[in-house]
Image (tube, helix red, strand yellow):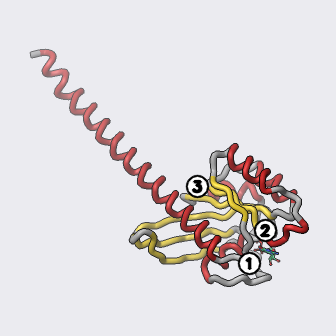
C-alpha cells in the first residue's frame, strides 16, 4: 500500500474544504463550521495500485499562513494551491507561493470574476505547474480528475526520488569498494 500525503493551500474562503469534500464525498456542502486544521483519509485505487491518501486541509484561522506553509512543506508529497476567481486578493496571495497544482475555484461565479483564466495559466507557467479552473459547487468529475492527476504526478515523483536514492546508494557503494580494493590493486 502506497502512502500519499497531499496538502491544500490558499487564502481563507478560497474553497479548499469545498473542493476536498467534493472529491471525497461527491457532494457540495455550502458551509463548514470548522476552526481547526483537518486531516482526511481515503483509500483508493489508481492504475491498479492501492493507495492510502492523507490530505491536510489547514484552517486559515488556526495560524499564520507562513506556519501552515512550513508545516505542509515538510510533511506533504504534493500540494494544491487554491484561489477564488472572484477574489483578486486570493490570487495575489497565490502568487507568493510555490506550487505543484494551481486551482482557480468558483468558476461558476464568472459574473463576479476578478482573475482571468489567462492570469492563472501564466502564473502556472512561471512555476511550471499544472493549472485548472473548477467549481466545487458544480463539478465532481473535473475535481476527481484533478486529484487523481495530482496523485499520479506525486507517485511518479516518489518513484523518481526512490530510484535516485538507490542509484546514488549504489554509486557510493561502488566508490567505497573502489577505495578499498582499487588502492590495493595499484600497489601490486
Ligand atoms: N459559488 C461558489 N462558492 C463556493 C465554491 N467553493 C466554495 N464556495 C463557498 O466559499 C465559501 C468558503 O468555502 P470553504 O471551502 O470553507 O473555503 P476554505 O478555503 O476551506 O476556507 P478556510 O477554511 O477559512 O480557509 C463557502 O461559503 C463555500 O460555500 C464554488 O465553487 N462556487
CB contact under 8 Å: marks 1 and 2: yes
Q: Is label 1 in a helix, a strand or a loop?
A: loop
Q: How far is the residue under mark 1 from the one under mark 3? A: 33 Å
Lower sequence index among marks 3 and 2: 3
**Disc ID at residue 107:** 2
Q: Is mark 2 within 8 Å of ligand 1?
A: yes
Ligand 1 quadrant? bottom right
Number of marks in the image?
Answer: 3
Q: Is 33 on the left-hand or right-hand side of 6?
A: right
Mark nearer the viewer, 3 or 2: 2
Quarter of the figure with residue 93: bottom right
Q: How far is the residue under mark 3 from the one under mark 2? A: 31 Å
Q: Could you say which is closer to the camera, residue 183 or residue 110?
A: 110
Q: Is 134 on the left-hand or right-hand side of 115?
A: left
Lower sequence index among marks 1 and 3: 3
Q: Is label 3 in a helix, a strand or a loop?
A: helix
Q: Could you say which is closer to the camera, residue 128 or residue 6?
A: 128
**In which quadrant of the rendered image does the N terminus lie?**
bottom left
Q: Residues within 10 Å of mark 3 (few under 14, many from 20)?
A: few
Residue carrying label 3: 74
Q: Where does the image place residue 148, in percent across and percent down from the top left?
A: 54, 67
Q: Is residue 33 above or below residue 50?
A: below
**Disc ID at residue 138:** 1
Q: How far is the residue under mark 1 from the one under mark 2? A: 9 Å
Q: Is residue 45 above or below residue 91?
A: below
Name the residue: 27% across, 38% down: 173
Q: Is mark 1 within 8 Å of ligand 1?
A: yes
Amino acid at each position: 500500500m502506497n502512502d500519499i500525503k497531499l496538502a491544500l493551500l490558499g487564502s481563507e474562503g478560497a474553497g479548499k474544504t469545498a473542493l476536498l469534500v467534493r472529491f471525497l464525498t461527491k457532494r457540495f456542502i455550502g458551509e463548514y463550521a470548522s476552526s481547526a486544521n483537518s486531516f482526511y483519509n481515503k483509500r483508493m485505487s489508481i492504475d491498479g495500485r492501492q493507495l492510502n491518501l492523507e490530505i491536510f486541509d489547514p484552517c486559515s484561522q488556526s495560524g499564520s499562513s507562513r506556519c501552515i506553509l512550513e508545516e505542509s512543506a515538510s510533511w506533504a508529497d504534493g500540494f494544491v494551491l487554491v484561489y477564488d476567481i472572484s477574489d483578486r486578493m486570493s490570487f495575489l496571495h497565490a502568487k507568493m507561493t510555490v506550487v505543484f497544482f494551481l486551482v482557480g475555484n468558483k468558476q461558476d461565479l464568472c459574473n463576479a470574476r476578478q482573475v482571468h483564466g489567462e492570469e492563472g495559466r501564466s502564473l502556472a507557467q512561471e512555476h511550471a505547474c499544472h493549472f485548472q479552473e473548477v467549481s466545487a459547487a458544480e463539478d465532481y468529475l473535473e475535481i476527481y480528475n484533478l486529484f487523481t492527476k495530482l496523485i499520479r504526478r506525486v507517485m511518479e515523483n516518489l518513484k523518481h526520488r526512490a530510484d535516485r536514492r538507490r542509484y546514488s546508494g549504489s554509486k557510493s557503494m561502488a566508490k567505497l569498494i573502489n577505495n578499498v580494493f582499487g588502492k590495493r590493486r595499484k600497489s601490486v
